[in-house]
Image (spheres, grey):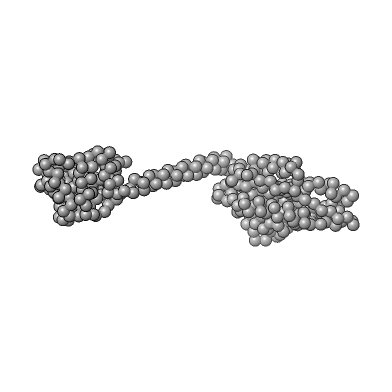
Amino acid sequence: MQSTLVLIKPDGVERNLIGEVISRFEKKGLKITAMKMLKMTLELAKEHYAEHVGKPFYDDLISYITSGPVVALVVEGREAVGVVRKLVGATDPVDAAPGTIRGDLSMDEPANTVHASDSVDAAKREIKRFFPGYWNKKRVNIESLQRKIEKLEKENVLLKKRAEWYNSQSQQMEGLIEQYNQLVKKEFDNIENVIEKMGTREVIDPTTRVYSRDHMLKYINFFHAKAFQENIEYSLIFVDIDDFEKATSGLNREQSDIILRELGKILKETVRVPLDTVSRLGANEFLILLTEISKKDSISVAKRINENCAAKKFTSNGKTVQLTCTTSVIHFPEDEAELSKLLENGEKLLEIGKKDGKNKVMFVK
């Protein structure tokens, strides 16, 4: 796209031809991007017509252009400089072809109605002369547009990846939707009733009375598909009880299970049941799904879990047991888009945290 300067001269303004001139450009498909009316000072006129100094018509030209108001326009379009010159016509209205602005609307010089830049370089100089901030503003607009384009391109890439994943998982997701749709709706109304109807042996871990590993993994698989489709943020928090067997040495199985059940209760009290879901992932390991939450807030929840775990003193068979937890946080979609990698990375972070001194909150920085 090119930009060029047009001046509607004092005779054009006096004869009320402003609208006529502008309409000629707009009918051609050109765009008016800046416009103002002004009275040219002697200094501005001399600067504008400096190339004509010493020519016989110079004094008349300066006298005429400062005799009344002019309208300055920036006209933009494909090959705008050349197109505008053709629309304007020859400098002498007598020689200008019918259909051009000067050919139709003028008879004399220098009162030939309009001035138009005669080259791209001249257009740049003249636009800067009459609209000092135009090019800076145009550059800012272009840079802003480029940033928007880059953002849209990145979003488009992400959408394509999501679409590809969605298509590859569609059959599995349809089966899960059919299996769990009824369950999910009821869980948000009355989760305890749903658990009773499904049977605690299949859904609930009997020791800790939180969700079982199998149920949790199936539910996460379904929820991940929903989150991918509807652009829902969520986090997984992995919780491992540090040195549980060592801390509970001397207790029997039933007494250790009571402590695990208390830990499950602490986890449920820390999160937003029923929005969030707590499960037992392994012997001393838990997995929590936090829905519709930012990564920052998820890390805060993990820190509260560690604090609540360390603050609790468990008493069983006359023995006081104090425990700590190591937690890891993986966030969708900020950390990873695929569920298998979310689970894998969460376990890896947990292992790193336990080797690094335990009682840690681990997350991708």
Position of residue 318 in the picture relative to residue 103 (left or right)? right
Residue found at x 64% / y 40%: 341
Image quadrant occupied by the N terminus: top left
Q: Position of residue 339 (x, y in %)?
A: 63, 43
Residue found at x 20% / y 42%: 50
Q: Position of residue 365 (x, y in %)?
A: 63, 44
Residue 146, above or below 272: above
Position of residue 153 in the picture relative to residue 338 (left or right)? left
Question: Quarter-wise, where is residue 19 in the image?
Answer: bottom left
Using the rendered image of the protein, determine whether residue 288 is visible from the camera's viewpoint: yes
Q: Nearer the viewer, residue 261 or 196?
A: 261
Position of residue 120 in the picture relative to residue 307 (left or right)? left
Residue found at x 67% / y 40%: 344
Q: Nearer the viewer, residue 308 or 27?
A: 308
Q: Position of residue 268 (x, y in %)?
A: 72, 57
Q: Nearer the viewer, residue 330 or 124?
A: 124
Q: Position of residue 176 (x, y in %)?
A: 63, 47
Residue found at x 80% / y 52%: 323
Q: Nearer the viewer, residue 233 or 186?
A: 233
Using the rendered image of the protein, determine whether residue 215 is visible from the camera's viewpoint: no
